[in-house]
Image (tube, grey):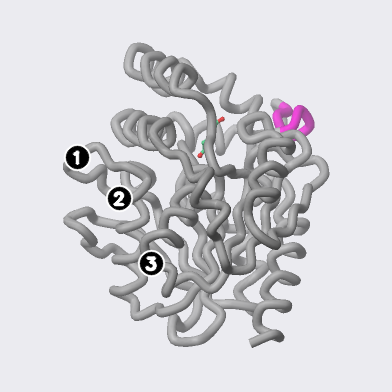
């Protein structure tokens, strides 16, 4: 467990392996989660890559930061963290809003990005009306008020069984995220549109989605892949919005073969 101050924000992160060793694989969490969602994936991929995990500001043990952060501010946090660690070229795997941050990082600091693994994410997520409604609900009723609806988008019915302890754990993860961090990140997603930027991505890109994803459905992720020149699209069976939790083995197989192609070519 490590902490560093970047752009005046304390970021909680963890490194598995030596950051000087390639490839470095960075995982960026989704809205309402923290880097523990990557545990099963990191464990499986630690032989293939050095792994960097961090909590986006306003989530997990990272600080909220002093102002309403846009996706570009989150990308600046990530570039600051990579600069601090001396990582010069990394594969960025971002889940949902984490994938928006990955796209923003590529826009602002393409020198840091060897490739993109865009997981359950898109060039644009949701509508302003949807995000404003979500923000209002959380401000008025707290995280509990959205819990059941979020879980239906995140996980398949099979995972949402009452005797699944992991399901209970991820419910707790969501309700324990700070309201201020959650709301600020909803606003950042609402205001982000990488449609034009996606057409200018010139690094290898893998777009992945779960077949039961209720937050960024397969057709949306497929349309993002179609915007990015040469991007590959893959769908994982029996997974909702958080395939790193529900189907870590399938996700790892895709990421492992992506890494293999990248570093064999180099
Ligand atoms: O997961 C994200 O980062 C944003 C997409 C979303 O709305 C997730 C959810 O359904 O709560």
Residue 37, percent from left and from top: 55, 50
Image marks 1 and 2: residues in contact by CB distance under 8 Å: yes
User: What mark, if any, has residue 168 been given in the picture?
Assistant: none
Tell me: 168 left or right of 81: right
Q: Is residue 146 above or below residue 126?
A: above
- Mark 2 or mark 3: whose residue is earlier in sequence: 2
The magenta stretch spans which residues?
A: 156-161
Q: Mark 2 points at which residue?
A: 73
For label 1, the residue is 67
**Place of residue 224 in the rendered image (x, y in percent of width and height, measured from the top left):** 64, 45
- Lower sequence index among marks 1 and 2: 1
SS assignment at label 1: loop
Task: Name the residue: 44% across, 51% down.
Answer: 101
Q: What element carries label 2?
A: helix
The secondary element bearing badge 3 is classed as: loop
Crowding at mark 3 (Cα within 10 Å: few <14, some 14-19, many 20+) = few
Seen in the picture, residue 81 relative to 63 is either above or below; the reply is: below
Q: Residue at x 59, y 77 (%)?
A: 49
Q: Position of residue 136 (x, y in %)?
A: 37, 15
Q: How far apart are marks 1 and 2 (CA)?
A: 10 Å
Between 259 and 165, which is closer to the camera in this rendering?
Answer: 259
Residue 158 within the magenta-colored segment of the rendering: yes
Q: Can residue 164 be seen in this view?
A: no
Residue underneath mark 3: 109
């Amino acid at each position: 467990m490590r902490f560093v101050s970047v752009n005046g924000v304390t970021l909680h992160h963890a490194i598995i392996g030596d950051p000087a060793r390639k490839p470095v694989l960075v995982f960026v969490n989704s809205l309402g989660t923290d880097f523990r969602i990557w545990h099963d994936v990191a464990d499986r991929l630690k032989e293939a890559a050095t792994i960097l995990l961090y909590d986006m500001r306003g989530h997990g043990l990272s600080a909220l930061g002093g102002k309403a952060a846009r996706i570009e501010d989150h990308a600046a946090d990530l570039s600051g963290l990579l600069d601090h660690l001396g990582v010069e070229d990394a594969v960025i795997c971002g889940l949902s809003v984490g994938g928006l941050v990955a796209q923003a990082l590529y826009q602002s600091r393409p020198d840091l990005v060897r490739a993109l693994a865009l997981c359950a994410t898109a060039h644009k997520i949701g509508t302003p009306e949807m995000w404003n409604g979500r923000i209002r609900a959380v401000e008025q009723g707290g995280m509990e008020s959205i819990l059941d609806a979020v879980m239906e988008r995140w996980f398949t019915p099979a995972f949402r069984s009452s005797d699944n302890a992991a399901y209970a754990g991820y419910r707790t993860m969501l309700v324990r995220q700070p309201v201020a961090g959650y709301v600020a990140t909803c606003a950042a997603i609402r205001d982000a549109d990488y449609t034009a930027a996606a057409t200018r991505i010139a690094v290898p890109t893998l777009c992945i989605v779960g077949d039961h994803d209720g937050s960024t459905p397969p057709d949306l992720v497929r349309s993002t892949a179609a915007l990015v020149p040469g991007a590959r699209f893959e769908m994982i069976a029996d997974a909702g919005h958080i395939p790193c939790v529900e189907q870590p083995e399938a996700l790892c197989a895709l990421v492992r073969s992506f890494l293999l192609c990248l570093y064999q070519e180099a």
